[in-house]
Image: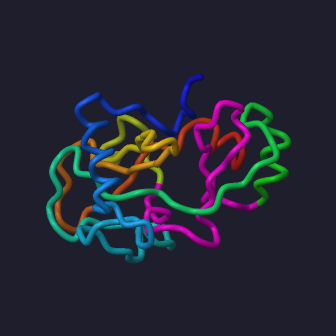
Amino acid sequence: EALADELTPPTELLRRRCVEEVRSGGVSATAGVDTSTYVAPDAHGGHGLFAATALPRHHIIGEYTGTLARGFLASDTTACSAACGADRYLMRYPDAAGSLHLSARSAGSLLRFVNHAPRGAPANNATCWAVLVDGAFHTLVATTRAVEKGEELAYDYGAAYWARHG
């Protein structure tokens, strides 16, 4: 099955690096991110995640964590919209049936503060990678280009997100 459109598969070399990072505890299960980022007010009146230091391309920022929710298929946008409600921190978990979703609304890592920027936009500087580690998927966020100190991190949320939230 194809990954949710907000997730991209990493290359094999990057996948191995992600697996090592998760297994070694380099990606914290509690904070979910390394010390290279901080949360601050963004330009749109909300909050964003910003680079505390210059970050190289393919820097693994951390793991998008939260609670798993079940009960509707991602392909059923009507049921998904009703079940999601106002949960703007919801991401599809890459299970075979397509019925699991990961929500960072009430619990999760600081990566819930990474905002949207469409692919190809100058502000788009990150991506989500779904990596299978010891039988469980981990959703890691990594930079797609060099990021300057103080720059806000952003990735494309994907069409399914906008179908749910408009």
Query: Does 100 appear in magenta?
Result: yes
Q: Which residue appears farthest toward the bottom when viewing the image?
A: 40
Determine whether, in the image, residue 163 is placed left or right of residue 1: right
Residue visible at 35% across and 54% down in the picture: 22
In the depicted structure, whether residue 141 falls above or below residue 27: above
Q: How is the image coloured?
A: rainbow
Residue 160 vs residue 9, the one in the foreground: 9
- Please state the horizontal and vertical placement of residue 9, each as a whole percent of the image: 40, 31
- Please state the horizontal and vertical placement of residue 40, each as a whole percent of the image: 38, 77
Badge count: 0
Q: Which residue appears farthest toward the front when viewing the image?
A: 134
Determine whether, in the image, residue 148 is placed left or right of residue 1: left
Residue visible at 60% across and 35% down in the picture: 159
Determine whether, in the image, residue 4 is placed left or right of residue 56: right
In the depicted structure, whether residue 113 falls above or below residue 116: below
Magenta stretch, main secondary structure class: loop
Residue visible at 85% across and 43% down in the picture: 79
- Please state the horizontal and vertical placement of residue 8, each as a whole percent of the image: 43, 33
Residue visible at 84% across and 40% down in the picture: 78
Magenta part of the protein: which range? Answer: 86-115
Query: Does 35 appear in magenta?
Result: no
For the N terminus, the quadrant is: top right
- Please state the horizontal and vertical placement of residue 141, each as a whole percent of the image: 38, 51
Q: Quadrant of residue 39?
A: bottom left
